[in-house]
Amino acid sequence: MKFGGVDNPQNINFVLPKDHPKTKEVLNTNSSDVCKVHVGYPSWNKVNLKGFYPSGTKDELQYYSREFNAIELNATFYRIFPPEQFEKWYHKTPANFRFFPKLNQEISHWKRLKNDINPVIDNYLFSAIRLREKLGCVFVQMHNNFGPKDFDRVINFVESWPKEIPLAIEFRHTDWHNDTVIANDLHQLFKANNISNVIVDSPGRRDIMHMHLTNTRAFIRFVCANHKSDYSRLDDWVKRLKSWKDAGVKHINFFVHQNIEKESPLLSAYLIEQLNSELGTDLKIPNKEPQQKLL
């Protein structure tokens, strides 16, 4: 994920913004003390996770899904996989594993939420629902230049989305978050339709750190700076997630976008250790045991 990358991360102010005032109101409506936490990467591809897989690993998804409990699944952005593929993924993974597939680019980038996207959505979901209970939350990431002038398309898309399938939406055009009138209207739409408001923490795009939860799901896409500040940034996120958990958040979905060099430690392992310590979770720490060659 190159979005918002910078050459000099040491010059960036990485302090997390304060919560949007409405976030507390949203969380206070939840009386449940149960919070499900899922952490993962955007892909299980060996090329993107150099140094992660033990020598001789034959099935990357099977190994990945026993180290992590979630995958962002960016592959579905580039093609609509047939139902049989989702069935295979379902059967390869443990019972506690969850998929968070990205909506196809034809919907978000080519047709840009126009009225004729319903057949494409139906085709996509016809396959994706084969994940059954392992379908965590579908998410859509809109193009940088998709702005509020097309708000009517967003309304139609959100209101026609099948309510039984969780959905999260990410907007990258700054006006969605920093035009007060637009932001308020958007958040009201999300709340009314139980849509999660994706938060992207990217070094070069601090302008879209809205910190506004619109339901009890915190969906965070964390873009590493490949700098020591990544660890302190994660420390700050753990504190914020702890406060949201205490306030009533029910789902935490945290996805780490990292350019991993061969043999380097996984930054997510550090995150999971902190979550286990501060939030009381019992997530497996990836590659905790020494790697051994698979037979």
Image: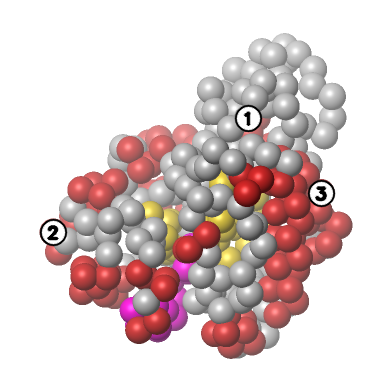
Please give the residue where the numbered disc 2 appears in the rendered image.
116
Q: Which scheme is used to colour this image of the protein?
A: secondary structure
Q: Which element type, helix, strand or loop, lies under badge 3? A: helix
- Extreme residue in the front direction: 11
In the displayed structure, does residue 229 sit left or right of residue 177?
A: right
- Say whether disc 1 or disc 2 marks the residue closer to the N-terminus: 2
Label 3 packing within 10 angstroms: few (<14), some (14-19), many (20+): some
Q: Which element type, helix, strand or loop, lies under badge 1? A: loop
> Which quadrant of the figure has residue 240?
bottom right
Is residue 3 shown to the viewer in this render? yes
Q: Position of residue 136 (x, y in %)?
A: 52, 56
195 part of magenta stretch: yes
Real-space Cα distance between discs 1 and 2? 39 Å
Q: Residue at x 37, y 36 (%)?
A: 84
Q: Position of residue 277 (x, y in %)?
A: 86, 57
Q: Nearer the viewer, residue 233 or 80?
A: 233
Please give the residue where the numbered disc 1 appears in the rendered image.
260
In the displayed structure, does residue 256 sit left or right of residue 184?
A: right
Label 2 packing within 10 angstroms: few (<14), some (14-19), many (20+): few
Which of discs 1 and 3 lies nearer the camera? The answer is 1
- Extreme residue in the left direction: 116
Please give the residue where the numbered disc 3 appears in the rendered image.
273
